[in-house]
Amino acid sequence: MTPALLAELVRAAASDVLSRRGLDLAALPVDVGVERPRNPDHGDYATNVAMRTAKKAGVAPRDLAGWLVEELASREGIASAEVAGPGFINLRLAADAQGGILTETLAAAGSYGTGDEYSGLNVNLEFVSANPTGPLHLGHTRWAAVGDALGRVLSARGAKVTREYYFNDAGGQISRFVESLVAAAKGEPTPENGYGGAYIGEIAAQVVAAEPGALALPDAERDEVFRKVGVDLMFTEIKRALHAFGTDFDVWFHERSLHDSGAVEVAVQRLKDTGNLYFADGAWWLRSTDEGDDKDRPVIKSDGTPAYIAGDLAYFLDKRTRGFDLLIYMLGADHHGYIARLRATAAAFGDSPDVVEVLIGQMVNLFRDGQPVRMSKRAGTAVSMDDLVEAVGVDAARYTLIRSSVDSTLDIDLDLISRHTNDNPVHYVRYAHARLASLARNAAELGLEPSTAFGLLEHPREGDLIRTIGEFPTVVASAAELREPHRVARYLEQLAGAYHKFYEACRVLPKGDEEPTELHRVRINLCIAARQVFANGLGLLGVSAPERM
């Protein structure tokens, strides 16, 4: 019996109890839930349905819980039910009923954990979107891992997700990038507020090699050559690094295209025509304070040139015109002000501000031997994506960046995540899958066919593993709803703990010349189900599930 089916059974039993006692059925909540108690001595599952229903039904919670316990104890699949505290109900399942979790897992296989609650929802997920002025740093790397995982989780629950990278190839930062390239090509010092690091010299040399006469051109033509070739080279490097990291995008959107196509002017004029911009002090303003911004933002400056937010307005309109229902922006720690601005943008175009969601990610710090790792020789100012991957590998980097909430600053111990020991979370999880793969090979060599006699799985460690497997769909649904893919990683660590404890307590394969029993065979099926969940969960994180370690 899966948690979802158990919740349905509890609700049905509660409905019967209310009906027999002439109590108001409307008092019963629609979303009756069951959850696993922290203390396994309290049972396999617990529900607070009596406490949620009693007041509206006009009875005491413990009285209603007592009636419901009597009803539940008579239902097939329930081994025992008891009242706890002010009206909680603790439940224990019969072993054969609990096996329904394994039946569902094995039947669903690679689709176990998926759902359809977001079916029909067209999501634009924009993340990373680093300026093409340098290698991707750790903040970008965190978003590359988390954003990709979030896209996978949302897709698993039915959404149509488009991963989009907004390429900021217009504006002042590009001018400074070009100035830095030209200075490097001439052998001059980095300009004030320019970009340093070995990569600038490398790109400058490539521009000169591609366009040998570039430095001899008039300044404006020279700068355009360095801009076009230099930005393309940086963009190619960013794409390469992301692909090597396992993160690919469906759309690479160039900010410059909004200006070149006239989309910025169209968007601004539309807001002027609808009265959603106001004119003051020689400039046109967006009322972003209506959505909590600390001040209204200029869209067209007093000199007649568009402010940066003008591009954001056009970009929002472009996304909505492409048919996206939900726009998720994943931004860095210094972008809190964008939350109100983007919501105000939606409101200005007549949309609900809720079509915009902004996720803010905090910084990442690296440590080795207890000391902070701050500098990248090539990047010049920060540790890059390539630096992290070179140090620990793609799988360890992705898993470590995903497993913590982006709301908090992340400190990474390079020594820890490089170890092949159980105190390293990524090793702990991936080793569980490898161990299960090895067990499957050994079972195949012995010619053991798995059994579905799940009623034989009565050991507490078996039950704990089964119930943990049963939580996976709920965890994935929660990760999608809350936009928190780290919940999948933390769940996998719990699953690994449950599996390793089961493995130590319950022998799966016959020992020596021992004849295999039905229990051996059914435990093989339990292991097959566990391995499937590890593979599915790691897949949602974009982390490989190894066959051997």
Image (cartoon, helix red, strand yellow):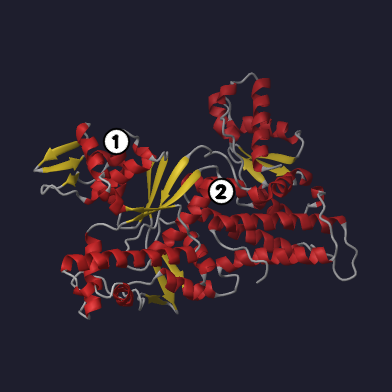
In front here: 462 or 472? Answer: 472
Q: Does residue 275 appear anywhere in the picture?
A: no
- Residue under pointer 1: 349
Left or right: where does residue 194 sit relative to residue 164? left
Establish if 366 lies above or below 293.
Answer: below
Q: Residue at x 24, y 67 (%)?
A: 178
Q: Farthest left residue?
A: 281
- Disc 2 marks which amino acid? Val
Q: Position of residue 485 (x, y in %)?
A: 50, 53
Secondary structure at numbered mark 2: helix
Q: Quadrant of residue 28?
A: top right
Q: Quadrant of the N terminus?
A: top right
Label 2: few (<14), some (14–19) or many (≥20) C-alpha neighbours in 10 Å? many
Horizontally, is 472 left or right of 241 in the view?
right
Q: Position of residue 143 (x, y in %)?
A: 42, 58
- Residue 166 image point, x, y percent: 35, 54
Which numbered mark, 2 or 1, is in the foreground of this view?
Answer: 1
Please give the name of the residue rendered at 25% of the width and 49% of the height, measured from the top-left corner.
Answer: 259
Q: Secondary structure at mark 1?
A: loop
Give the vertical position of 131 relative to 378 (above or below): above
Between 30 and 385, the one nearer to me in the picture: 385
Question: Which three-letter amino acid code belongs to the residue tagged 1?
Answer: Phe
The C terminus sits in image quarter: bottom right
Q: Residue at x 62, y 63 (%)?
A: 545
Q: Seen in the image, is 373 located left or right of residue 4?
A: left
- Residue 249 shows up from this direction: yes
Q: Closer to the N terminus: mark 2 or mark 1?
A: 1
Above-or-below relation of 127 to 69: below
The residue indicated by pointer 2 is 476
* C-alpha separation, residue under disc 2 versus residue under disc 1: 33 Å
Closest to the observer: 479 or 201? 201
